Image (spheres, rainbow, N blue to C red):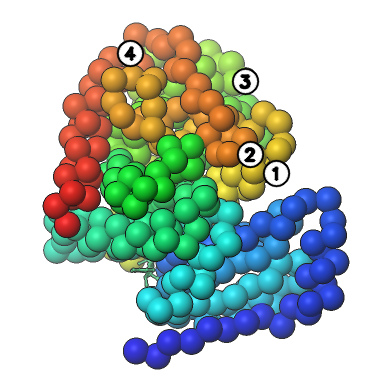
Amino acid sequence: MLRSILRSSTSNASRRGFASGASPERKVAILGAAGGIGQPLSLLMKLNPLVTRLALYDIAGTPGVAADVSHINTGSEVVGYMGDENLGKALEGSDVVIIPAGVPRKPGMTRDDLFNINAGIVKSLCTAIAKYCPNALVNMISNPVNSTVPIAAEVFKKAGTYDEKRLFGVTTLDVVRAKTFYAGKAKVNVAEVNVPVVGGHAGITILPLFSQATPKANLSDDEIVALTKRTQDGGTEVVEAKAGKGSATLSMAYAGAVFADACLKGLNGAPDVVECSFVQSTVTELPFFASKVRIGKNGVEEVLGLGALSNFEKEGLEKLKPELKASIEKGIKFAHQN
Ligand code: NAI
């Protein structure tokens, strides 16, 4: 297979200039950068002024993506890396590693097929992260997040590098959807909306807490049920609209960029950086759970509790636990057996 590394034409002078600014130098690596999510995510991270170096890694297609993105006149240096033997170089020195590598579900594939392929990819990428950038904040996008995050944790434990503060399952798309759908129904300005989304990142394990949504609105029980279902089925809505041509990529890239930006701000010491994420948790009896998380200089600074829940949300919480537990256990089992 053709392997290559492509460097952007960003000059040393402009790199030095950027480095002398107020923010520290930050390297972000995107693994799976040539994919449906990876490409727009690469674009959005190139636009992020907190990024000084952007490493774009994939098993194919990264020279083109890196050449394209590198022409954008923002301060960061873009380097494309392709193929296994360049993975180490892509990862070295990374502060944040974002993983949208893997396959979306295709016709004829069972969920287990998808699980096995993506679980294997995540396992090998995390093995390399443990070796080349064990201190990076890992943003896991590859599905099923409910299982891939526990797999990553087991890989890091085995390598002796596990730090629960540095591993995040990206559930931001659920929050993005919940905000958009709520704003539409409540007729409030979407830019002002906040909705925590807790639990996990698949079907009924996604639990939006509309009782805590702000600005407050007087929505009926039926409207809350419908909003909850729409948030849980948001991925399917996109898959069906794309008629077999893929799953959410653009909204996911946006969500991934929002979450990575929060990680960079936290690392840089910005106060009160709070996002929902699927992390190691004691909020419930499950070992991993999504809830609001305060992100700081070392990653997770605080896992925030659930707050007051409506009866509907309490029921949803109890219903999701068995499925989430099974997905977590499936990931752990995979990591041990393979
Ligand atoms: P895609 O097939 O368009 O892109 C995946 C990319 O990963 C491809 O460029 C492929 O070459 C690359 N890849 C495969 N094996 C790799 C390896 N070992 N190392 C590095 N790169 C590798 O898929 P798409 O639509 O971008 O989705 C990617 C993943 O994100 C899927 O697992 C999907 O289910 C998940 N996803 C997660 C969401 C979330 O909210 N967390 C939302 C939507 C999708």
Q: In the figure, is residue 148 to the left or right of 307?
A: left
Residue 68: mark: none
Give the residue at mark 1: 268
Q: Provide residue 166's location: percent of width, then percent of height.
A: 48, 42
Give the residue at mark 2: 297
Q: In the figure, is residue 255 to the left or right of 193?
A: left
Give the residue at mark 3: 215
Quarter for ligand 1?
Answer: bottom left
How dense is the environment of label 2, judged by Cα within 10 Å: few (below 14), some, or many (20 and up)?
some
Query: What's under tag 4, amino acid-wise?
Result: Lys
Query: What's under tag 3, amino acid-wise?
Result: Pro
In space, the residues marked 4 and 2 are separated at their CA atoms by: 33 Å
In space, the residues marked 4 and 1 are separated at their CA atoms by: 36 Å
Q: Earlier in the sequence, mark 3 or mark 1?
A: 3
Looking at the image, residue 182 lies above or below residue 68: above
Residue at screen point 70% across, 62% down: 52
Q: Earlier in the sequence, mark 4 or mark 1?
A: 1
Q: Tell me whether circle 2 and circle 1 mark residues in contact (CB < 8 Å).
A: yes
Residue 221 seen by the camera:
yes
How dense is the environment of label 3, judged by Cα within 10 Å: few (below 14), some, or many (20 and up)?
some
Residue at screen point 58% across, 54% down: 95
